[in-house]
Amino acid sequence: MQDVEQIIFDNETLIKKVIYKLKIYRDLDEYMQVGRIALWQALQKFDDTKGDFTMFAYMTVKYAIIRALSKANHVTEHELAVEEDVIIVNSQQHNMVTSSLEWPEWFEELNKDEQFLLIGLYEKELSLKEIADKYKLSYETIKKRHQRLLTKLRGLLI
């Protein structure tokens, strides 16, 4: 069997392909490292009699990166990226209409629905489903508003 470092080097494209297919655009180095570790684990577990190494490695890398994304999502579920800083909001005693946060100047450029959604998601720590249920709106409506809000925020912050 080839040197492990050489095999990992030869399969960097495989790891990048997985990252691209999962639409990961942040923390690329971290997920590349997760992929390398998964590739090394795939080398340890692979049995030549059971099939092709490339497909086994692809699936091992893919699921390792998905697990890492799940863990990262759990941590960053209630974070809002603002420029280079991250605001972590944990306030449950305020009502939905008013905000206890000092939001950046771009917050005033949002309409009331968008402000409402941001406050619900990041200050009240509600999920999209919880917001829809609480205010008797359809989940799909809230989901579309959320997608439009994210697009608008990207435009404001660039």
Image (cartoon, helix red, strand yellow):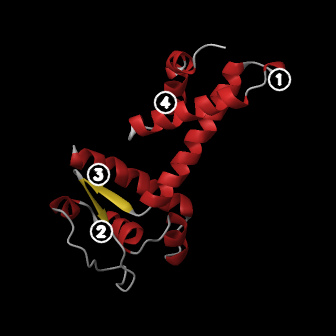
Depth check, mark 4 against mark 3: the one in front is: 4
Residue topped by disc 1 = 50
As drawn, the label of residue 153 is: 3
* Residue with the mark numbered 2: 112
Check disc 3: other Cα within 10 Å, few if <14, some if 14-19, many if 20+.
some
Task: Give the numbered dot on residue 102.
Answer: none
At a point 37% along the width and 61% down the height, the residue shown is 79
- Quick one: label 2 or label 1, which is nearer the N terminus? 1
Find the residue positioned furthest to the bottom.
Answer: 93
> N-terminal of the two: label 2 or label 4?
4
Dot 2: within a 10 Å radius of its alpha carbon, few (fewer than 14), some, or many (20 or more) residues?
few
Q: Which residue is mark 4?
A: 20
Q: Are marks 1 and 3 in contact (CB under 8 Å)?
A: no
Query: What crowding class fits label 4: few (fewer than 14 Cα within 10 Å), some (14-19), or many (20 or more)?
Result: few
Where's residue 86, x and y in %? 28, 58
The answer to whether 76 appears left or right of 52 in the picture is left
Mark 1 vs 3, N-terminal side = 1
* Up-down relation of residue 88 to residue 154 (above or below): below
Mark 2 vs mark 3, foreground winner is 3
